[in-house]
Every structure is written in C-alpha cells, then in structure tokens.
Image: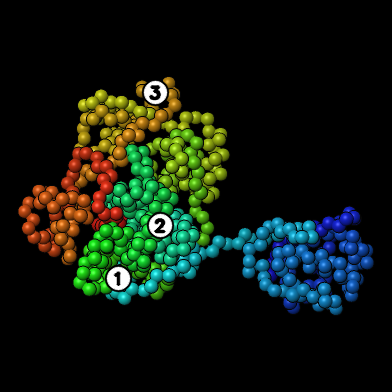
Amino acid sequence: MTVGWARCCAHADTKPRGQTINLSAHPTLFSENKFTLNIILISVDLTAMHQYHHENFAPTGAMHAPLIRLIHSALLAIGILFSLQAAHAEEQLALSFSLADQAVPRTIPNARNIVLDIIPDNEPAPGDLWARIRNGFAMRDLNSPLVAKHEQWYASRPDYMARMTDRARRYLHYITAEVERRGMPSEIALLPMIESAFNPGAYSTARASGIWQFIPSTGKSFGMEQNWWYDGRRDIVSATHGALDYLQKLHDMFGDWELALAAYNWGEGAVQRAQSRNRKRGLPVNYASLKMPHETRSYVPKLLAVKNIIADPSKFGLVLQDIPDQPYFAALATPRHMDVKLAAQLANISMEEFEALNPAHNRPVILQDSSELILLPVGAADTFAANLESYDKPLVSWQAYQPKKGERLDSLAPRFGLSVAKLKAVNGLPRYIKTSTGQTLLVPVNAEEDEAGEEFEAFNMHLAPTYDSGRAIKHKVRKGDTLGGLARRYHVSISRLKQWNGPLKIIRIGQVITVAQATPRSRTAKSGNRSRKVAQTNKALDGI
C-alpha cells in the first residue's frame, strides 16, 4: 500500500520545537510482513514527541505510546488503522482497509485539531462510464425475434458503432447522471443511439431534430425555444431535460417503459387509441399486444439490442471506445453577443468540437441571452474566461443589412465577400430564391458597409425558425402502412397526398409516394394532434 507523502501537524498548549521522524527506519513500528507503508516524513509539533526524540527512539514499551497515539489519531481521521507489534493495547493498530477502497480528501481535519495532508503518488483514474451504465440496467428483456435481428445489424457494422460511440463520449456522462438523478433505468441514456446515433445535427423527414429528435411542436411544449437564431431542440442540455421530462410523463401515463417508449416514438394519442381498440375487442393492452407501425414495433427491440451489446460487447465481436466516468463539458453564459468562431478560438478548441457541443445556434453569432449557454470541454472553460477577459477587439464580425425588396442576391453577396450559397445558408434562405424578399440579412462587417463600429444588436427576433423544406420528401410504402396513417405521420391531409400523387385508392408495398413537396416558404412549428412524430428510418443515419 502506497500513501505517498504525509505531513501530520498536531498542536498542544505548549509549542516546543518541531521534530522530524523517519518512520521507515523503525521496523518495530511498521512490520514489513504486514504491509508496506510509504509515509516518508511526519513532522510533529508535540511536547511528548520532543521527549520521545530526546529518549533516542527507545525501541520498546511505553516510550512508543505518545508517538503511537499521535499516529493513531491522525490515521483515524481518514479511517485507516494499522497493526503494530507492541505490548500495549493502545498500540494495537489493525489494517482495516486500503487507501484504494475509498476516496481520501487531500486535507482531513479531526476533533483533535490534527490535519493530515495526503499527496497521492498518482491522481486516481476516473471510472468506466460503460460499467456505470451497465449497473443501472433495469428494463426487462423482450421476447421478440426483432431484438436478435437488430443485435446482428449493429454487430455487423463495427465502423458505425465506433462513430456513434465516439460522438456519444461528449454527452453520455451528462445524460447518464440526469437519468440516474430521476431514478430512471440507464437504458434511457442509450436512447439517442436509436433516435439519432448521437448526431446532434440529425434531422428527420418528419422535421424532428437533435440527438433526442423532437419535432417543433413537442419541443416547444417542453421548453425548447426555437427562433431564427437558435433551435433548443439541438441544445444538448435543454433537449435532454425535455426528453426526460416527456419520458417521465409518458411512464406515469402508461405505467411501464415499453409503452412509454412506444409513445415517445409513435405519439401518446396513437398508443391510447391502439389500447382503446384492443379493449373493445377484449385483447390485452400491453406493448406486445398492440398493433403499431413497423418503426414503432422495432423501436424497443432496437434499444434492447443496443443494451445487450453494451452489456457484453465481446459477445458480439465489438470493442467499445473507453469513456471515462467524469464530466466532459462545463456550461457558461455569454456576457455579450459573440461570433461562434471567436468563441471556439477563445476556448482554444476546434470549430468541430465547439459545434458538436453547441449545435443549437442557427447563425454564426451567439446572442447574449440567458437561454443561450455555451458548453465547453471542462479543461477549456478557464482558458475561455481568461482569453475573453484580455480580448480587446470586437466580439462580433457580422452586421444587419436591410436589402431592397427584389435586390438580386448574386450582386449583393460579392459586396460582402460571400458566395450566393453562403449568403443563403447563413440566413436560412431557400435554395431556389434569387432576389431579396426584404428580410433583414446577416452579413459580414466590411469597410464598405461598416457602420463606424456600432454595437451589434439582434434582429429578426420576430421570425420563426426556418426548416429544411427545399426538397420533396418521399416515402416507400411498407407492410402495415395506410393512407390515413401516412397522412397523420407527415401532418398532411389525404386530399393533399392524392393531389401530389394522383389517384391513390390503394397503396401497395414498395410503392414510393410523395409525402411533402418542395416549397418556397419557410415552415413554422405547427401544433398537431400528436405529441411526437415517428422518427423515420430514412434519417440518413447509415452514413454518419
């Protein structure tokens, strides 16, 4: 057992001169056949210690008592007892457990005003987060061949699993801690693997976004602000809190996690209607007995397949990337508006890392707002604060520009050193648009347009968020699909589906139909009669 250096300072009413004792020179005090103690130096300020030293370290009997009492008291302060071979009972100190058995604070006071400072040889290594997650598994196994099917799917794609777990390392400790705090099974912490493969930029055909895949209306219901500048559905902290709040609500509503997860995927109203149909027919209303879409039927088996792989990756021929059981990021409020790029520079981290931790920002400027915290790796937070304090240049290199309605973008963009595509991307403009609609644009500051270094002010706060509606969305009909079901899934009327696809009296398996047309306008978050859209399997996650 190695303790390293220990300094033990005790104080009596009188203050004799301190003495230095080399305990390693006294095998009668520390029997080598019991243990090895690497306490190199103990400095003692005690009258009895001076007397002990004056007696020239007499090796026997009562002369040991003052020293032993002192060491005994100091070691008791951290719960460590040693065994010494000596005659007196007060000198019998038994080794009850090693330092490795519990974390020892660096400074430990006790009632006798003895302070023992421990300087360990090495900082203790953080634990394994996967082990912590395994210890919290609590969902029951599901008797379904779909579990084995999805186990095989994931096991046969080691590169996919590696990319997914590499992304997860940034977020999984935080999510696991939140799941544990709420008393939920730790399988819930793995749910983003099913929803988004832990891709913070994942965006589904149902307009679900972020690692938890919220559609706009449900995100808004659970406190995720969405505007032209910011989408809280992609905010790691905000979306995690919203997802766990929603899952707790669903568990309270349905009474078990299988139904709660089905409702998270399919919608609570859809699950309730399926249960109602079964009750009318005298059938069970549990998860396995309900008729549901293919995606929802596979949802829980996918999660349990991932759980089984995490529980024993070697069984499936996989090796999981190590993830330490310690916080990955810290949250900071931005004191002023600031460029995204500058924030990454001040923290001395890459743009890729910054954007992975802060994917909610729609524009290249972070607004100073209480809802817009930034996340930084734990080791970069102090760097950011120090560099920000000493930074004496403008924090924002962008400005508002009010174009004339009908002004051509291909003549406007070069004035600010932008390509037309970049101008559209920065401002969330549809790809087909060629002239300005009169909307205020975000453009770089340059010499031609600079307004004498005016303070940046937020604008377009009245605008709803823009979603990727510039392309048509197709759906390949699967077994169990109905026209009415597709209409509900994609928030569109049956008449509109028929308008886009011609007469649709019957749909057939394998048929490809248009469920959303390319549109020139930005779509806002519309509330629907379902709380949660199905996260489609064609999220293009296979390539991420």
Which quarter of the figure is the C terminus placed in? bottom left
**With 292 as the anchor, is 170 left or right in this view?**
right
Which dot, 1 or 3, sits closer to the camera?
1
- Amino acid carrying label 1: it is Asn
Q: Is residue 156 visible?
A: no
Task: Tell which of 55 and 337 is nearer to you.
Answer: 337
Q: Quadrant of residue 366?
A: top left
Report the disc number at residue 286: 1
Which quarter of the figure is the N terminus placed in? bottom right
Secondary structure at badge 3 equals loop
Q: Is residue 373 visible?
A: yes
Q: Which residue is drawn at 70% across and 67% down?
A: 79
Residue 347, image x, y percentages: 50, 43
**With 229 as the anchor, is 276 left or right in this view?**
left
Q: Which residue is drawn at 17% across and 46% down?
A: 517
Task: Tell which of 256 and 521 is nearer to you.
Answer: 256
Q: Using the numbered discs, state the Cα–Cα distance from disc 1 to disc 3 in whole angstroms.
A: 64 Å
**How does the figure colour the protein chain or chains?**
rainbow
Report the disc number at residue 244: 2
Residue 329, image x, y percentages: 49, 51
Q: Do the residues labelled 2 and 3 touch (CB within 8 Å)?
A: no
